[in-house]
Amino acid sequence: MSGKVTSQRSSQRQTPEVEQEELTAQKALELYRNALNFNVISRYDEFIKQLLYHTSHCVIYKFNDETQEWVKTDYQGTLALYLRDFKVPQNTGYPPTYQDLQNLFCYGLLLLNRNNPECFSLGLLPNKIIKHFFPHGLNNMNILEMDVELNDNLIIVKDLVGDIYGLWVFNEEDRMKLYKLLEFCLSNDSSML
């Protein structure tokens, strides 16, 4: 009888260790995926600083103003949101240029396309920073902020030149997390500069 008790105790002791090993293996796999995604993204954007989030399956749609319909693009694959090592433009007395904007983006969205070699990318900038550096919008277009909203199954992102993109993320939990992160990125305080 004492042999059975000992055997039950030893199996009870092994169970947490086995679970702990599985968690460690799962974390190791996640770390590997993050490192791999970081390395791939750094080939497209040398200013990547930190991977914030990624989801394995996203499809990009673009809103057509003329037809008022969503058009599916040829972009689908892994989508990553990341922090960029940005550069504040020097005060030259002239309005910031398009290149200044490219250097100023604090965050980036990059879709690693499974359909062809061309990837989708979109720079993101907190709206307080946009209003500070581009008080009349980029090229005086009067688009004073980027916007993100959740509509049914699409995360809708409006950029600084007026283009509207729909991000369809397969996993609902991933969709909500990505939406909340994008919302944070656009509403982040300008004190980071």
Image (cartoon, rainbow, N blue to C red):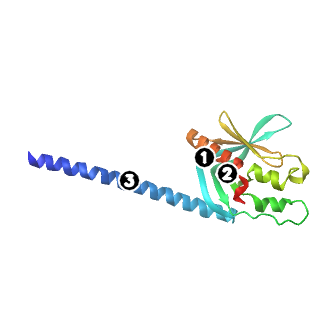
Callout 1, which amino acid?
His
Q: Position of residue 36 (x, y in %)?
A: 56, 61
Q: Nearer the viewer, mark 1 or mark 3?
A: 3
Q: Left or right: where does residue 7 sit relative to residue 67?
A: left
Callout 3, which amino acid?
Glu
Q: Element at badge 3?
A: helix
- The quadrant the C terminus occupies is bottom right
Q: Is residue 118 visible?
A: no
Q: Nearer the viewer, mark 3 or mark 2?
A: 3
Disc 3 + disc 2, Cβ < 8 Å: no
Callout 2, which amino acid?
Asn
Q: Which residue is mark 1?
A: 57
- Give the quarter of the image for residue 73: top right
Q: Residue at x 50, y 59 (%)?
A: 31
Tell me: residue 152, above or below residue 58.
Answer: above
Q: Earlier in the sequence, mark 3 or mark 2?
A: 3
Q: Which residue is mark 2?
A: 115
Q: Element at badge 2?
A: loop
Q: Is residue 103 visible?
A: yes
Q: Left or right: where does residue 24 sit relative to residue 120?
A: left
Q: Which residue is mark 3?
A: 22
Q: Left or right: where does residue 67 sit relative to residue 109?
A: right
